Amino acid sequence: MADTAPASELVTLEVDGRSVEVAPGSLVWDACERAGVFVPVYCAHKKLEPVAVCRMCLVEVQGMPKLQPACATRVSPGMVVRTATEQVRKFRDSNLEFLLLNHPLDCPVCDRGGECDLQDFTQRYGPGQSRQSITEKVHFNKAVPLSDKIILDQERCILCWRCVRYYEEITGEREIVLQERGVHTLVDTFEHQPLRSEFQGNLPEICPVGALTHAKYRFRARPWDLRRTASICSHCSYGCSVFVDAREDQVARYASSDNPDVDDSWLCDRGRYSFPELNRKDRVLSPEAATAGGRQVVSYQDALGRAAGQLLRVGSDNGGEAIGVIGSDLMTNEEAFLLQWLARDIIGTPHLGHRLLPAPEISPLDFELGIAEIEECDQVVVLGPLPEQLAPVLTLRLFKAGTKRARKILRVEAPFTVAAIRKQVIGEGRVGVVAAESDREAALKLRTALTGAGRRCEVLTLMERVNSRGCQDLGLLPGWLPGYRRAPSPGMELPDILEAAIAGRIKALLVVNPGPDLEADPRLEAALKGAEVTVVVAAFPGVASRNATVLLPGRTIVEKAGTVTNAEGRVQRVRTAVEPKFAFPSDLKILGDLARAMGGELGAQPLAGPVYDLLARAVPAYRGAQAGLRPRWEATA
Amino acid sequence: MSDRDGAVPAADLDPAVVARIRELRTLYPLARSAVLPALWAVQDRIGYLPAWSEEVVGRELGLLPADVAAVASFYSMYFGRPVGRHVIQVCQNVSCALRGADDLLDHLRGWLGVDGEGESPDGAFSLEGTVECLGACGGGPMMQVDRYSYESLTPERAEAILTEIRETNPEGPVGG
Ligand code: SF4
Ligand code: SF4
Ligand code: FES
């Protein structure tokens, strides 16, 4: 509902005796919502165009002879809407009776039971009993796999068309159609071909009943078994909002949550179904240390003391520069900030990093364009297939910009030469350039050329992981201090740190939250073996944990609290959705305790809130942004 | 549904049919509008719509085969499998049902010698099993034979009509 119109242009109408004002062109459904009046809907969906096929939302509109669908009727001034009349009540009751005529009523074994609109509305508005004496219902196929991800129960479908329209309007892939007619109508794919979309996981969420279900969630939990936590998808740098639904200490599913600025309520399958990784049983569960008698489980205090002692000894014997500090872009902003402070100010080394790919040049211009702003650009230039591979949900935003907003989407092929691309950029308006981080240079060159020619042009680069942007903003890089200030004497990039450790020039390594790329790099093992001291904080066992002289248990992203920053620079909260299986301090507190044990004073509690305040003092753009805002960086062009 | 293929292979589709579909495409502003006539073009030639024909129509009109299949399956006038020389459809929706459509259908089953649905032993007729509204609610019970509707039927009248069709149109559909 576009409520940005000035008050004088609002339409005033009455809903159940209450006067409400809404923007012209709003639906009666919107007006009811504004009046605080709930209207049951099946086919209507906030992100889809109205079709008014289910008739669940019918209401009385004064002056109209028949009931009107609230989901498809536009408001007009002075309209009088009634939803609580006997006629509406009777109609809802009968409509539900019809819907249940052939419904299998297998709620006890249906994944949707407890969060199903058919169950809920029947409870609330429907008949307790059917008047039909039908003993044999019309039966359809149950548990039809539409792909390895989605299972369809054709009997439970209430033919609301949402899935068909989702594929038409949101992804454009049109993989599902309604076939046959009347009571025989079925949702299906052409000739039972499997679904191929990368966005299938949204289907069970838009289905109002239990017809479309997740293969990975089948018979896993009831909604009342789940504890829901609002957080951020940890799979890429796009930063989609999710609900982490946990059952005891396991993540049972990721559910989407609508952030219109980022995900627009859709998730990609890669992100949505990435949660089993977080349920891995093999974890680092207790502090360990290499002793004369071999590797031993030790107390937290003992491990901390050993780690501080060993790092201090290497520092005093060889200088701080003999120590390399390695983080990862799976860390929160608070952890990343604390780690770079620990490295620079306490350990006294310039050799720190979090990524194998060097970042000699970075700038806030890399993400001047916001995700939602893509829709505001007259033309959007997409450099090759990489951006959409890095952040699949971007594809849906581009599709929306191209269809609902009629923007021109220009997908160009490598090599990305300014001359070739400029020829294709037509007209006068605003241009957005969307690129993978590895193509930032080409993107910025295009920006320079177009702004030089008087066009408004902004760039958005997509990165690898959930907090790649935050680690860069906060200076967990050898060449950059927090807030895009160049380090006066840059240290070694991460690959060079590894090489130096192999060569014996780096004598101690502090490794925190090693990511999968680092774990997979063959140089890591040699580097850890080459260093005398290796302090590791890790959630999962691996090369780093096996080669640690001191090992501390780390947390996964769903066990942490703090903030992460997505590709467009938006700072968003991650919250503890699952308690770890051990009672040791968080990664953030480990870093704070380690600093203290080495004689450093943080000047704040090592908790997400206080550390955020600290980092916002160092990086003023971050001030107040933790509520989901994009920091405003000073123009550094 | 692969049983829908086989009878007529895709390679045997008359090139003139493809040419006709291409021509139909030019007659409408929207490609989707050409789906119905394009399906007729195929069915008129080979008697029914094999699954591959939906792909052909989709390809020629720039639509997904799924879209074409959705349309083809919606209408009872298109056949997804080979049928007899004349196709009989007896509407069973509310208006007709109230006026005895079930009895009429049962009677015709007995008279034609068809168990449930399918071809009569002499191959002259195909009786469809369940048929939704055919748009003649004012004249129930009704049946459609090939492309003509016959309304206000009694079992006797239906028999007489079918007997005449069998005798006067031994070759194929009436009203094509
Ligand atoms: S499968 Fe679900 S979303 Fe699709 S039409 Fe049926 S009820 Fe609606
Ligand atoms: S686009 Fe990225 S953040 Fe969004 S759901 Fe997919 S993996 Fe997760
Ligand atoms: S919600 Fe209005 S008709 Fe379906």
Image: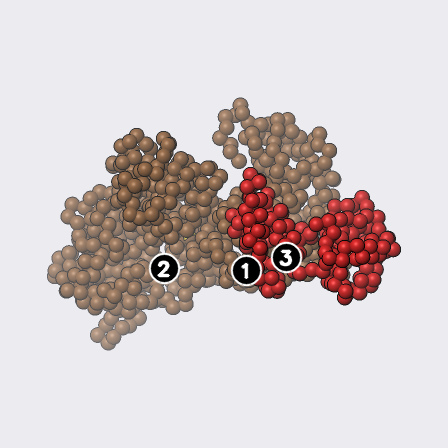
Chain colours: A brown, B red
- Residue type, mark 1 in image: Ala
**Residue situated in front as seen by the camera: A59 or A144:** A144
- Rounded to the nearest whole Å, what is the CA distance between mark 2 and mark 1? 61 Å
**Are marks 2 and 1 in one subunit?**
no
Question: Callout 2 environment at 10 Å: few (<14), some (14 to 19), or many (20+)?
Answer: many
Residue lying at 29% horizontally and 45% vertically, measured from the top left: A416
Report the disc number at residue A555: 2
Q: Residue furthest bottom?
A: A293
Tell me residue A458's x, y (percent): 33, 38
Q: Is mark 1 within 8 Å of ligand 1?
A: no
Q: Which chain's residue wears label 1? A: B
Asked where in the image residue A55 lies, by quadrant, the reply is top right
Q: Which chain's residue wears label 3? A: B
Asked where in the image residue A494 lies, by quadrant, the reply is bottom left
- Residue type, mark 2 in image: Arg
Residue annotated with mark 1: B11
**Are marks 3 and 1 in one subunit?**
yes
Residue annotated with mark 3: B46
Secondary-structure class at tag 2: loop
- Rounded to the nearest whole Å, what is the CA distance between mark 3 and mark 2? 66 Å
